[in-house]
Amino acid sequence: MRSAGVLYVKHLGPMRSFYRACFEMAVIDDAPDYSVLESEPLTLSLVAVPERIAAAIVLSVPASRREGVPIKLAFVVDSIEALRPVFAEFGGAVDPATTQWEFRGGIHCDAVDPEGNVIQLVQPIAQASSETDD
C-alpha cells in the first residue's frame, strides 16, 4: 500500500502524459474516464470530470493558476532545474528559481500542471548540494 491522491481533470490524455513524463509514473490502469498512475511512493488517480461540468471549466494557455483549493500535491524530485523544460514541453510551468524556499531538508518550488493545478516540487538538499559540486 502507498500514499494516494485523486485529481479531477478536464483533459485526461494530456494530463496523463504530463504526470507520466514529469514524475516517471507508470500507467497501471486506464479507461476512457480515468487513469491510475503509480510511482514507488504514490498512486495518482486522474479522473475525467463529467462533460456537463467540464463545459464550465475554462482553461488557458499558459494555464491560469488555481490557488483557491484546499489541497496541493507534492512530489519529491531529483532536480527541480531538470524538470523545467519537461514541464514546459507538456504544458505546465515551474515557478522561477527566485521563489524557491528551504524547509525541512528540502528545496521547495511551486509549479502548475497543464490545467493550472498548483503542485509542489521538493528536491532533497543533499541532491541540490551534489549538483553544485559538479
Image: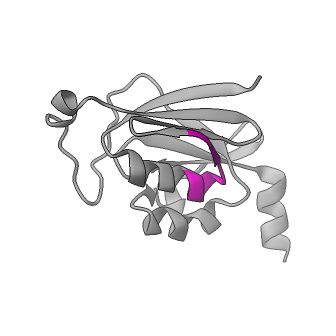
Please name whichever residue, 68 or 6, is drawn nearer the observer in this view of the structure: 6
- The relative height of residue 77 versus residue 120 in the rendered view (above or below) is below
Q: Residue at x 64, y 33 (%)?
A: 43
The image quarter in which residue 58 lies: top left
Identity of the residue furthest to the bottom in this view: 134
* Res. 123 visible in picture: yes
Could you say where residue 63 lies in the image, as x and y percent from the top left? 30, 53
- The relative height of residue 85 versus residue 60 in the rendered view (above or below) is below
Reply yes or no: does residue 93 show up in magenta. no
Q: Residue at x 46, y 56 (%)?
A: 95
- The relative height of residue 19 versus residue 33 in the rendered view (above or below) is below
In the drawing, does residue 19 fall left or right of residue 51? right
Reply yes or no: does residue 23 show up in magenta. yes
The image quarter in which residue 48 lies: top left
Could you say where residue 99 lies in the image, as x and y percent from the top left? 50, 53
Q: Which residues are magenta?
A: 20-29
In the drawing, does residue 124 fall left or right of residue 117? right
